[in-house]
Image: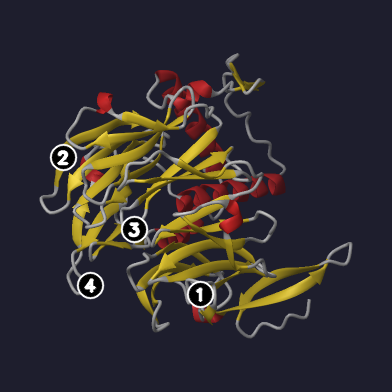
Amino acid sequence: MPSSPALRALGLSLAFASGTALALRGAEPSKPPDTRRDPVVETLSGVEIADPYRWLEDQDAPSTREWIAAQNSYTDSVLAPLAGRDRTQRRLTELIKIDTVGVPFVRGGRTFFSKRKADQDLFVLYVRPRPEAPDEVLLDPHGLSPDHSVSVSFEDVSLDGRVLAYGVRNGGQDEVEVRFMDVDARRDLADALPRARYEGVALTADRSAAYYCRQTEQGPRVFRHAMGSAVAKDEEIFGKGYGPEKYIDVGISGDGHWLKMEAEHGSAGSKVDVYVQDLRKGTPVVTIVNDLDASFTGSIAADRLYLLTNWKAARGRVMAVDLADPRRERWKELIPEGPSVITDVTLTGGKLLLNRLQDVATRLSIHEADGKLLRELALPGLGAVGGVSGDWSQDEAFFSFSSLAQPPTIYRYQAGSGQRDVWARLEVPIRSEDVEIEQVWYASKDGTKVPMFIAHRNGVRLDG
């Protein structure tokens, strides 16, 4: 069964506590089981990369299962004598065993989201047909494997909300099988993409085709799959010349007009190229940028490409490209670089929703399509925003907010009115009102002031 971030945190917490207890007792834990190292070396771009533990990637191999059993046995022998372990485990389990909900997104008036109930191991895919309608289970993966090791995830949903592309993953493998579902009938279509590493899947507006990027031995390649046809006949449309160290993400604009491809050079994202294709005209792929050592991520609306880039702006700026004439000298700067770092731009309700990082805390602001600031969004406090979703043609956006004192809460935001309300709140057995969060500044060795957060119980005097 794949572990959640919370369960991994539980294991790390107990392991740390165990190590501390052993140190206090002066005890020496037994030696961990040996791990076999194989002489596996791969040459990538002329550089030899050693990968001695590749054999562990095969989770079903007898040698891997034996290794896992030995590691678990050793871990249990270290943790079992830990004083207070049962009490700590009970409390952490109370905090972990809660309903968890993902940030929703809307397609064709239907709201899609994932949810895992407190007594479930896996996330279930849901759909809310109308805003006032009850939630309906779209796909429950618990029946796909007796040990609940097979999970599912959203890959894409057609613009009208009628076809779902979802990934099926075995354990923690990188590879997934992509299946397609008729949302109304709740049945899988005959189409399916075989198990592989996919960087993105995007359905066309008329649901007649799906574009996807698959990692091949030569590198990432973008294909077009005509729905109802054999995968072997899929047309390769982009990626020739890109090596395996590259990644290509694909997406289709909200009106179905444009295919967008972002080619990332390495996992750091320090250099990202952008390409587009007019799906209505079927013209060749057009290069927006591929010759600059900078990051570019974009979204398309009304035949305009909105780019977030660090090109000549270390903290980020927003530029607009007219896709009818995408020459660089025609690019327009909409939002210049400022004192805060722009981390994300979401198109919603004909406006731009900016996610910015300032003094280690998130700020949200809404801007007109020309970049003019409309308003700053009031957040519940100092914290982090994640998972923002929205659409150019829809007035509402969704985002998750959490802080050192507030569990993740999903909010719905109306771009036109600026109204914000709670869409889903996690019921965690803690009292956030008993915790006070303060941001303070501390001078580092060279005099630079560094922001820090202090979390403490209400009423505590900070006189240490």
**Vertical placement of residue 316 versus 198, above or below:** below
Asked if marks 3 and 4 touch (Cβ < 8 Å), the reply is no
- Is disc 3 placed on a helix, strand or loop? loop
Disc 1 marks which amino acid? His
Q: Which residue is mark 4?
A: 131
Question: Which numbered disc, 2 or 1, marks the residue that appears first in the sequence?
Answer: 2
Determine the residue located farthest toward the right in the rendered image.
446
Q: Which residue is mark 2?
A: 189
- Is disc 2 placed on a helix, strand or loop? strand
**Vertical placement of residue 348 versus 175, above or below:** below
The x and y percentages for residue 374 are 51, 81
**Crowding at mark 3 (Cα within 10 Å: few <14, some 14-19, many 20+):** many
Residue 345 left/right relative to 201 = right
Q: Which residue is at a point 53% across and 75% down the rendered structure image?
A: 365
Query: For residue 79, what is the image quadrant?
Result: top right
> Can you tell which of label 2 and label 1 is closer to the viewer?
1
Residue 445 left/right relative to 92 = right
Cα distance in 3D space between marks 2 and 1: 41 Å
**Residue 197 visible in the picture:** yes
The x and y percentages for residue 236 are 36, 29
**Crowding at mark 1 (Cα within 10 Å: few <14, some 14-19, many 20+):** many
Asked if marks 2 and 1 touch (Cβ < 8 Å), the reply is no
